Amino acid sequence: MGGSILFLLLAVVFLFSSSADACDRCLHHSKASYFSSASALSSGACAYGSMATGFFAGHIAAAMPSIYKDGAGCGACFQVRCKNPTLCSSKGTTVMVTDLNKRNQTDLVLSSRAFRAMAKPVVGADTDLLKQGILDIEYQRVPCDYGNKKMSVRVEESSKKPNYLAIKLLYQGGQTEVVAIDIAQVGSSHWSYMTRSHGAVWVTDKVPTGALQFKFVVTAGYDGKMVWSQRVLPSNWEAGKTYDAGVQITDIAQEGCDPCDHHIWT
């Protein structure tokens, strides 16, 4: 219990330090390129694997370190549009962060599908965009919208009963970041904390027995918020399977920076 509280306090410290680093909701001007290899989309640092290309119809991106945030930015959504008035639409497209961009020439590296989606709905415009290679863009963070779909918890293949559990969250809505996860047996008040291993993956070597419940601490408003998923994993949970969390996150985190224009383009 004490360790869990300590981890929560550390998470709150991270919340305020990360919000001061960059204002995701504000409009940013930069450049974007695209992945020339489709295989790169399934090997992203967020560890979504082959599932990555299924998010937002394959409109995904690698983001620079200040957006990736050591994995806390995995699953974040951004609206992106290019600035060439001849080739680019005013709406652009929405992408989900699935990887870390280590290049310093661009803030984002998009999937080719997302890159083409920034084009005007004119025959050949998307092909002409690809020929550009690198484009001037503007982008802003927006809420991830999965409609009526609930958040899911996937048990990673590396999990080994009864001593090791690795999970990642899928279909996380809203405009937030998960900064801490606590775990307990269903019906128990003895909580222990999980740690972020890499990307979107959280792990613990103190796995409670029986069915498992989770508490997710997320950024919300100007503070943190706990989302309690009271029954997620059954007692016979299996590695490689995905389970319905029964909850969804719809909050929008507010950042401690100057006010900015963050309306969604249409």
Image (spheres, grey):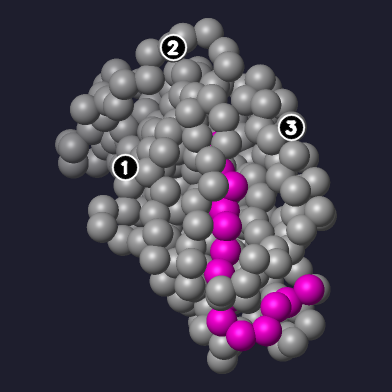
User: Mark 1 or mark 3: which is in front?
Assistant: 3
Name the residue type under label 3.
Val
Tag 3 secondary structure: helix
Lower position in the chain sequence, tag 1 or tag 2: 1
Label 1, on which residue? 117
In the rendered structure, are the residues bearing label 2 and label 3 in contact, judged by CB atoms less than 8 Å apart?
A: no
Of 71 and 107, the residue lying toward us: 71
Q: Quadrant of the N terminus?
A: bottom right
Name the residue type under label 2.
Cys
Residue 106 relative to residue 250: left or right: right
Label 3, on which residue? 13
Name the residue type under label 1.
Ala
Please state the extent of the stretch shown in magenta in the rendering: 206-219
- Vertical order, 102 against 18 (above or below): below
Measuring from the top left, give residue 38's x and y in whole percent.
51, 61
Residue drawn at point x = 31 percent, y = 21 percent: 263
Count neighbours of disc 1 (C-alpha within 10 A) and say few if under 14, some if 14 to 19, many if 20 or more.
many
Residue drawn at point x = 53 percent, y = 61 percent: 169
Residue 84 visible from this viewpoint: yes
- Vertical order, 50 against 238 (above or below): above
Measuring from the top left, give residue 213's x and y in whole percent.
56, 69
Quadrant of residue 255 within the rendered picture: top right
In the rendered structure, are the residues bearing label 1 and label 3 in contact, judged by CB atoms less than 8 Å apart?
A: no
Of 206 and 160, the residue lying toward us: 206
Residue 218 lies within the magenta run: yes
Quadrant of residue 63 within the rendered picture: top right
Lower position in the chain sequence, tag 2 or tag 3: 3
Residue 166 relative to residue 258: left or right: right
Tag 2 secondary structure: loop
Label 2, on which residue? 260
Q: CA distance from mark 2 to mark 3?
A: 24 Å
Q: Quadrant of the C terminus?
A: top left
